Image (tube, rainbow, N blue to C red):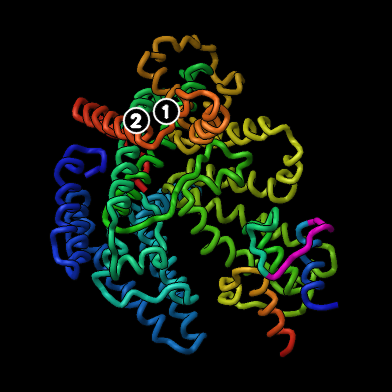
């Protein structure tokens, strides 16, 4: 049941929100847990039981970690718990990929192939496992107290608002809200507004752009032409942002309507000035997870006594260690996104560029002309998205060659894209690009500069006028989104398969 | 040379800025270039300079420079 579906918007969500406020306070968590189970049943019933088992086992792990006083034992329990969760993820998500690659090697060696039944991954497993690993580590490091209430813990993991595609929430952010929460009218209205924005981003922008992107990436490699390639990659860059940030807005909005405050997951990522800056703005709950639970521990682990001696003697710098660590972390990040070589190579590419930035480029870029920094960042990000979206690494390489106007096909093709550039696409592209611009700061600069001198500008910025305009906008967006939803069944939710 | 001055020297080296002057209340937000990448370099440099080791729990618990100073002080005095 995707968020942007009539069933969710007209039936499930109103019922859950109303029910949450009608049931007695002591039953609110149980009600939300029940609603989350219903949501899971609607979306992925075959995997409900394995996920419930996973929750029960990790609830026990959390309690065991807190009871254990001896540090060595504690560390051992943490290691066992983390490895267990990783193995669960590997089993459900990567078995098929591993077996496929083992069979390729077996083929080279003349051995017979292994067959394996196709194991589908439970809904949101990648997010669930990462969230649980964060919880176990935070309990161990005493950043958060373990959740003693099993319904509370189950809700923390299964909460329907963030189950499909995050944000990856930390227990410390929601532990207070889990025990008691009050929702002001302001909070509720804020949540509703975020939800409307999220639906609009998904339905009015992302889904429209998808209609150009999907056919292009389904083309045979020899039919790729530069104009079409650039258009498709531009559309995809916007599509993935609006799709995923729209989903995050919906998740955050629903959470807020029900009394939970999740951290922001996006911060205008396409305004980044480097790839390092991009990762502070894109999928923030993931990049902070990678930093806290993979990058930092790995970096310290790689800084062995031998390495420290070399650093002390001046023959080695600790930033070489962090550069290697970054490469490993982002390769893992790529793999986390999907069990395919395109994702692994995407991650490695990010890792290599981030490593180069950390060693030298970031410092050199500080003196660059600022627009050039932005262009560099966008070119790198968009080129990497080609890998992320392509059906194979070969296709991605052909596409990148085509975009660089290098011949990748025997006969150059007609680059006429005027048929693809429909009015709908052009409008959506323009809106998509404009909304990435710093609209709010431009508006407040206008207000500062002209508010005093021009009465009409001052009038427009009066609170009731602003409120009225905003309300009309939200209503319009909601109506347009619902109209678009009811007129089409095309609902490609990109991050849903992670 | 007191602890703060010695720590300041380490900061100057790690962040390549001889003008840098740290104060106990400062956090990562107050020092340009202090992100998770340079944080590792900083911790390793501090450990090397003062000949101490921080545990994972201790590193995670460091919120600002006065926390770092207190942690160094407790280990150096041992």
Q: Is residue A114 visible?
A: yes
Residue under numbered circle 1: A460
Taking the image as shown, residue A19 lies to the left or right of residue A74, namely left
> Does the residue at mark 1 contact the one at mark 2 (Cβ under 8 Å)?
yes
Residue A139 among those drawn in magenta: no
How many neighbours does mark 1 have within 10 angstroms: few (below 14), some (14-19), or many (20 or more)? Answer: some
Q: Earlier in the sequence, mark 1 or mark 2?
A: 1
Residue nearer the viewer, A143 or A354:
A143
In this view, A156 is above or below B56: above
Which chain's residue wears label 1? Answer: A
Quadrant occupied by the N terminus of chain A: top left
Name the residue located 47 percent from the left edge and 24 percent from the top edge: A455
Residue under numbered circle 2: A469
Residue A426 position in % (x across, y down): 42, 17
Residue A194 position in % (x across, y down): 34, 43
Res A271 quadrant in image: top right
Residue B17 among those drawn in magenta: yes
Magenta span of residues: B16-24
Q: CA distance from mark 1 to mark 2?
A: 9 Å
In this view, A277 is above or below B52: above
In this view, A126 is above or below A69: above
Residue nearer the viewer, A363 or A483:
A483
Q: Secondary structure at mark 2?
A: helix
């Amino acid at each position: 049941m995707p968020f942007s579906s009539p069933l969710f918007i007209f039936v499930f969500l109103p019922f859950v929100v109303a029910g949450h406020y009608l049931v007695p306070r002591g039953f609110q968590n149980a009600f939300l847990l029940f609603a989350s189970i219903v949501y899971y049943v609607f979306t992925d019933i075959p995997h409900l039981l394995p996920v419930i088992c996973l929750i029960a086992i990790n609830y026990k792990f959390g309690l065991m970690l807190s009871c254990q006083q001896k540090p060595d034992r504690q560390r051992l329990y943490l290691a066992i718990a983390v490895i267990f969760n990783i193995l669960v993820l590997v089993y459900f998500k990567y078995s098929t990929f591993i077996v496929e690659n083992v069979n390729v090697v077996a083929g080279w060696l003349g051995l017979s192939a292994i067959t394996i039944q196709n194991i589908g991954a439970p809904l949101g497993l990648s997010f669930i496992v990462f969230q649980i690993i964060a919880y176990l580590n935070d309990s161990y490091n005493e950043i958060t107290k373990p959740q003693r209430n099993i319904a509370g813990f189950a809700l923390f993991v299964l909460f329907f608002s963030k189950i499909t595609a995050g944000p990856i929430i930390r227990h410390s952010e929601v532990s207070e809200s889990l025990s008691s929460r009050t929702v002001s009218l302001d909070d509720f209205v804020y949540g509703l507004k975020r939800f409307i924005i999220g639906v609009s981003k998904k339905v009015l922008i992302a889904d429209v752009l998808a209609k150009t992107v999907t056919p292009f990436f389904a083309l045979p490699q020899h039919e790729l032409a530069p104009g079409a390639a650039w258009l498709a990659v531009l559309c995809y860059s916007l599509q993935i942002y609006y799709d995923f940030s729209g989903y995050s807005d919906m998740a955050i909005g629903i959470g807020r309507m029900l009394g939970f405050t999740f951290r922001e997951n996006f911060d205008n990522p396409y305004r980044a000035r480097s790839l390092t800056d991009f990762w502070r703005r894109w999928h923030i709950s993931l990049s902070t997870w990678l930093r806290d639970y993979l990058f930092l521990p790995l970096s310290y682990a790689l800084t062995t006594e031998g390495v420290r001696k070399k650093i002390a003697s001046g023959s080695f710098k600790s930033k070489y260690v962090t550069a290697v660590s970054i490469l490993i972390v982002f390769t893992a990040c790529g793999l986390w996104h999907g069990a395919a070589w395109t994702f692994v190579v995407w991650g490695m590419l990010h890792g290599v560029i981030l490593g180069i930035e950390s060693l030298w480029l970031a410092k050199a870029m500080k003196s660059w002309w600022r627009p050039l920094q932005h262009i560099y960042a966008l070119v790198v990000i968009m080129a990497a998205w080609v890998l992320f979206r392509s059906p194979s690494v070969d296709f991605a390489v052909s596409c990148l060659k085509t975009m660089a106007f290098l011949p990748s096909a025997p006969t150059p093709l007609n680059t006429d894209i005027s048929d693809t550039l429909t009015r709908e696409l052009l409008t959506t592209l323009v809106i998509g690009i404009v909304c990435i611009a710093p609209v709010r700061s431009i508006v407040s600069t206008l207000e500062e500069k002209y508010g005093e001198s021009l009465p009409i500008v001052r009038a427009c910025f009066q609170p009731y006028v602003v409120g009225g305009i905003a309300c009309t906008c939200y209503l319009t967006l909601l109506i347009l989104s619902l109209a678009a939803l009811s007129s089409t069944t095309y609902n490609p939710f990109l991050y849903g398969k992670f | 040379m007191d602890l703060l001055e010695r720590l300041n020297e380490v900061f100057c080296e790690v962040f390549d800025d001889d003008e840098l002057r740290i104060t106990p209340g400062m956090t990562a937000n107050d020092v340009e270039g202090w992100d998770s990448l340079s944080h590792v370099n900083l911790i390793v440099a501090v450990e090397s300079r003062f000949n101490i080791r921080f545990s994972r729990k201790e590193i995670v618990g460091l919120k600002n420079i006065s926390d770092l100073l207190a942690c160094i002080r407790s280990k150096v005095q041992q």
